[in-house]
Amino acid sequence: MGVSKHELHEEFPQFSQLIDQLKQDDFDFRERFKQYAELDQQIEGLELRDSPIGDDSLHQLKQQRLELKDNLYRELVRQSGGAG
């Protein structure tokens, strides 16, 4: 199984500065960003170690990460004035 990184700055390089600004200035964004990063590291660790986790459980974790990423992306677009 291939392991790919999903770090938010790499996923949305056009918003790199805005991500840094919001992490510093917006408590809610910072908390969601932290939750996303922790979940991404957890998934990456499971994939790298080929841990004994069921496909359904791994799929659920990836689905949570995707929902967080979508949520963060919508906030980035909103904060940038819609330029995505």
Image (cartoon, rainbow, N blue to C red):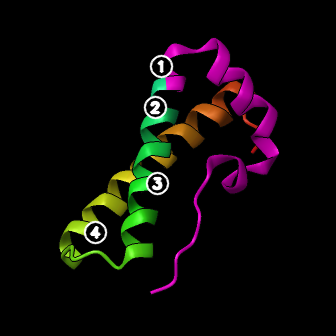
Numbered tag placed on residue 40 in the rendering: 3
How many marks on residues?
4
Q: Please name whichever residue, 35 or 80, is drawn nearer the observer in this view of the structure.
A: 35
Q: CA distance from mark 3 to mark 1?
A: 18 Å
First-in-chain label (2 vs 4): 2
Which element carries disc 4, helix, strand or loop? helix
Q: CA distance from mark 4 to mark 3?
A: 11 Å
Vertical position of residue 49 compared to residue 78: above or below: below
First-in-chain label (4 vs 1): 1
Q: CA distance from mark 2 to mark 4?
A: 20 Å
* Residue to which mark 2 is pinned: 32
First-in-chain label (4 vs 3): 3
Q: Which residues are magenta?
A: 1-30
> What kind of secondary structure does the magenta stretch mostly adopt?
helix
**Three-letter amino acid code at the position of disc 4:** Leu
* Residue to which mark 4 is pinned: 58
**Three-letter amino acid code at the position of disc 3:** Asp
* Residue to which mark 1 is pinned: 28
